[in-house]
Amino acid sequence: LSIPFEIVAKTGIIATIKGKNPGKTVLLRADMDALEVYEKNDVSYKSQKDGLMHACGHDGHIAMLLGAAHVLNDVKNDFSGEVKLLFQPAEETAQGAKAVIEESKITNSIDAAFAIHLWQGVPVGKISLESGARMAAADLFSIKVKGKSGHGSMPHETIDAVVVASAIVMNLQHLVSRNTNPLDTLVVTVGKLVAGTRHNIIAGEALLEGTIRSFSDEVWKKVPEQLERVVKNTAAAYDASVEINLTRATPPLVNNQDISNILKNSAVKLYGEEVVTKYEKTPGGEDFAYFTQVVPGALAFVGIRNDAKGINSPHHSETFNMDEEALEMGANLYAQFAID
């Protein structure tokens, strides 16, 4: 295609298509990474790497952005401005977008950003383009509880880390039921609790690991202080101590109203009003949110489910697949949005 490009964040690519005249700069983003999943699909395009597969649609994202690159490169003398094509690594670890932004400073030079996620929850032939919160902030935490071990017959000489950890699990739900507006969303999940060595030994240490998800910036920004307050005060009540590690994986992904309107007009221009569908926001995380935090942007869900063809396995499963008719639709939407 002879489109100039640069390498960013080790394995990422930013390509630039310049229009005929100066104008606004639009970023189109596709994530690229695969997953540690053993593919069970019996198809010609099955993964060639045992234990690794594209189980979230990212290969489709790459294909769509390459298709858009062909279209935009062919008509570059017919539009003004620039189009940045970002092939982004490491979305699944929530580190890729942040690394691209920090290294390239690309958000200083773009006026809008757009990404597509091929989505199993939306039927093929439909596109969800709503404004507002679309995907949740995702925080990861680990809590190490330090008590005092001892024999089960001498509890008064111990500080039971299991009891402390259990109290922390229960008290964290207080953040949901009493510290958060019931009209907002906050989900606190403790998915792992490890403690103890024997049935008759009171554990001196325990490890908790979990996630916290929310849809609003206001709720998300309060999480670090709230988590620390509940955990440390609970531990103190039992004369135990704690070590807390909180990783802010992604902020909430909120679609800009103006960008969503442009996207809707682009989709209707291509495929008519009937292509637009409504789809509820999802509590999954998406690191494209790092772009929408600082520039007007939006993410669209392009449908890939086709029950008639048996294409309906969930994302990240070993039988995930997509109806490839969605790829042309996504490529055209990328290109039309950039032009509009």
Image (spheres, helix red, strand yellow):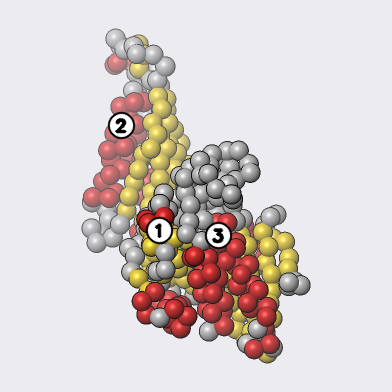
Q: Position of residue 305 (x, y in %)?
A: 41, 58
Bin the neighbour count of mark 3 within 10 Å (Cα to Cα): few under 14, some 14-19, many 20 and up.
Answer: many
In the image, what residue type sits under mark 1?
Asn
From the viewer's perspective, tell me whether residue 24 is left or right of residue 250. Answer: right
- The relative height of residue 309 versus residue 193 in the rendered view (above or below) is below
Pointer 1 local density, CA inside 10 Å: few below 14, some 14–19, many at least 20: some
Q: Amino acid at mark 2?
A: Ser
Q: Are marks 1 and 2 in contact (CB under 8 Å)?
A: no
Quarter of the view holding residue 278: bottom left
Residue that label 2 marks: 166
At horizontal 32% and vertical 53% (from top left) the residue drawn is 186
Look at the image and tell me whether residue 26 can be seen: yes
Q: Secondary structure at mark 2?
A: helix
Q: Nearer the viewer, residue 52 or 8?
A: 52
Looking at the rendered image, the disc whose residue lies closer to the viewer, 1 or 3, is 1
Q: What residue sits right under mark 3 in the picture?
A: 60
Q: Position of residue 59 (x, y in %)?
A: 57, 56
Residue at numbered disc 1: 306
Amino acid type for the residue under numbered disc 3: Gly
Separation of disc 3 and disc 2 at Cα?
43 Å
Q: How much space separates mark 1 and mark 2, taking CA atoms? A: 44 Å
User: Which circle's residue, 1 or 3, is located before the other in the chain?
Assistant: 3
Residue name at image x 27 percent, y 53 percent = 179
Earlier residue among tags 1 and 2: 2
Q: Does 167 sit above or below residue 322?
A: above
